[in-house]
Image: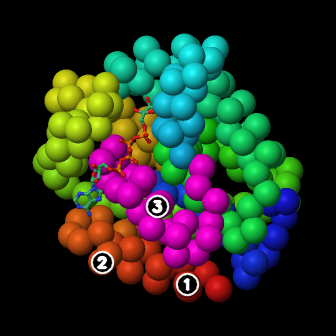
Amino acid sequence: NLKTKHKTMLNLVIFGAPGSGKGTQSEVLIEKYGFDHISTGDILRAEIRQESELGKAAKSYMDAGQLVPDSLIIDMIEKVLRERKPKKGIILDGFPRTVAQAEALDALFARLDTQVHAVLDLQVAEDELVERLLKRGQDSGRSDDNLETIQKRLGVYHAQTAPIAEHYAKKGVHHPIAGSGAITDITARIARVIDALG
Ligand code: B4P
């Protein structure tokens, strides 16, 4: 049941470029606050491992550093959001990634009589992003963590994903977070925003 008040349940979006620490901070936040974690990247990688129709459709886009088409992602997230029964709140990680996805999420939450309460935008310099992803690529086995694909993903981020920040700034829920430094320091910056939500 996603219909709640601030004090009982929060709908949070963790936002930022590839390598900005979305997955990393989500893991810490689910532990600290008991939130449900919905990572579209993780769901898509699981679909690929299972060789589902969605996985087969998504794989070529992901390997090329492109976004999976909005229609597939929006159907997928609607299904996931309806199945989950979060108690403390949810962290959307890697979604929305386009303005069309953000608008679809607004419409879905409106139907459930709720909204996005905060967008936590992790800001990290480009050279550090590349360095982190290349380092992960050494042992993650992720087919998209190589220099050529990383550069494509960063280009896609600037062209298609970064404009969402403005969409949420207009709604007064966009929070820039300095995303460099120790993981615990970044968590503390995020926690200050979450705790101020009430
Ligand atoms: P994602 O799985 O979301 O991958 P990502 O953007 O690289 O972020 P991730 O969360 O994994 O990395 P993090 O920054 O935590 O997406 C992969 C692909 O799936 C996309 O390219 C797209 O094709 C598709 N996709 C997913 N969602 C979609 C959607 N909504 N619409 C369309 N397509 C979609 O960590 C990176 C590295 O940095 C890690 O190794 C970590 O250890 C390190 N790190 C983190 N914090 C650090 C710190 N403070 N200091 C040093 N290193 C740090």
Find disc 3 in the rendering and name its residue. Answer: 27
Q: Nearer the N terminus, badge 2 or badge 3? A: 3
Q: Mark 1 to mark 2: distance in Å?
A: 15 Å
Residue 29 counted in the magenta span: yes
Give, as a single range, the part of the protein colored magenta.
16-38
Q: Residue at x 46, y 83 (%)?
A: 192
Q: Is residue 194 above or below residue 60?
A: below
**Mark 3 or mark 1, which is nearer the start of the sequence?**
3
Residue 161 vs residue 30, the one in the foreground:
30
| Circle nearer the viewer, 2 or 3 | 3
Q: Which residue is mark 2?
A: 185
* Position of residue 31 in the picture relative to residue 158 (left or right): right
- Disc with the residue nearer the chain's start (1 vs 2): 2
- Measured in 3D between alpha carbons, the distance from the residue under mark 1 to the one under mark 3, in whole angstroms, is 17 Å
Give the percent coordinates (x, y) of residue 198.
65, 85
What residue is rendered at 34% in x and 56% in y?
Answer: 21
Disc 1 residue type?
Asp
Residue under numbered circle 1:
195
Looking at the rendering, the quadrant in which ligand 1 lies is top left
The kind of secondary structure element at disc 3 is: helix
Q: Amino acid at mark 2?
A: Asp
Say above or below: 190 vs 137: below
Is the residue indicated by label 1 positioned so its CB lies within 8 Å of ligand 1?
no
